[in-house]
């Protein structure tokens, strides 16, 4: 029986063309008025998944690494 991809991780990440796994930073959804503009600006865009987690992520998403 084939293994299924992890649907929760599939919804939260994006695989780039070069093979990096990108995800959004935390603390960006609410209570933004109390955070300073530098913190909000630095949290824009995604962040690459740590290299130590790539084996587990590749297995869960069924990508070759």
Image: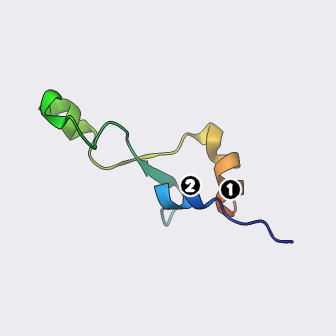
Residue 22 picture location, percent across and down: 46, 52
Q: Secondary structure at mark 2?
A: helix
Is the residue 34 above or below the residue 30 in the image? above
Residue at x 68%, y 56% (from the top left corner): 60
Question: Circle 1 is placed at which residue position?
Answer: 60
> Dot 1, crowdedness within 10 Å: few (<14), some or many (≥20)?
some
Q: Residue 3: percent from the left, percent from the top? A: 78, 65
How many numbered markers are drawn? 2
Mark number, residue 35 = none
Precedes in sequence: disc 1 or disc 2: 2
User: Looking at the image, can residue 28 be seen?
Assistant: yes
Q: Position of residue 42 (x, y in %)?
A: 25, 37
Q: Nearer the viewer, residue 11 or 46?
A: 11
Would residue 19 be visible to someone looking at this image?
no
Residue labelled with disc 2: 9
Measured in 3D between alpha carbons, the distance from the residue under mark 1 to the one under mark 2, in whole angstroms, is 8 Å
Q: Quadrant of residue 40?
A: top left
Secondary structure beneath dot 1 equals: helix
Report the residue at 18% width, 36% height from top. 32
The structure residue drawn at horizontal position 48% and vertical position 62%, both measured from the top left corner, is 16
Q: From the viewer's perspective, tell me whether residue 56 is left or right of residue 10.
A: right
Q: Please, which residue is most extreme toward the front here?
A: 30
Marks 1,2: beta carbons within 8 A: yes
| Picture coordinates of residue 33, whole percent (x, y) | 12, 33
């Amino acid at each position: 029986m084939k293994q299924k991809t992890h649907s929760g991780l599939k919804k939260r990440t994006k695989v780039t063309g070069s093979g990096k796994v990108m995800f959004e930073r935390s603390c960006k959804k609410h209570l933004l008025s109390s955070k300073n503009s530098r913190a909000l600006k630095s949290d824009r865009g995604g962040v690459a998944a740590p290299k130590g987690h790539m084996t587990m992520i590749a297995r869960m998403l069924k990508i070759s690494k």
